[in-house]
Image (cartoon, helix red, strand yellow):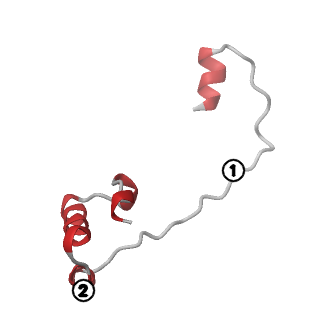
Amino acid sequence: MRIFLLREALAKPLADFSTFTRARKIERIPVVLFGDECHRLFAALDGTAQLMAELMYRSGLRLRDADLSPLV
């Protein structure tokens, strides 16, 4: 993307990139709970925390998608 920006949009000359090596891509394994683990987690919660956790789970939200600060 940056090469395109430099070459096409800004019309800047590019240096020789043949000696550069690409950065290694970090493989991340997603953290997933199985159905029975989710049920045990929900059973351990109560009240608003349980409601919020179940709503987030069933709607496909991640923790970073929801503001949980009022619950803490």
**Can you identify the residue that label 2 sits on?**
40
Query: Where, by quadrant of the figure, is residue 46 drawn?
Result: bottom left
Label 1, residues with CA under 10 Å away: few <14, some 14-19, many ≥20: few
Q: Secondary structure at mark 2?
A: helix
Q: Position of residue 35 (x, y in %)?
A: 22, 80
- The residue singled out by tag 1 in the image is 22
Q: Quadrant of residue 62?
A: bottom left
Dot 1 falls on a residue whose secondary structure is: loop
State the residue in front, 53 or 2: 53
| Foreground pick, 57 / 46 | 46
Name the kind of residue labelled 1 in the image. Arg
Mark 2: amino acid:
Arg
Q: Tell me the quarter of the image containing the C terminus.
A: bottom left
Q: Position of residue 2 (x, y in %)?
A: 62, 30
Q: Where 19 falls versus 51 (above or below)?
A: above
Q: Residue at position x 35%, y 74% from top?
A: 32
Marks 1, 2: nearer the viewer: 2
Q: Is residue 33 left or right of residue 30?
A: left
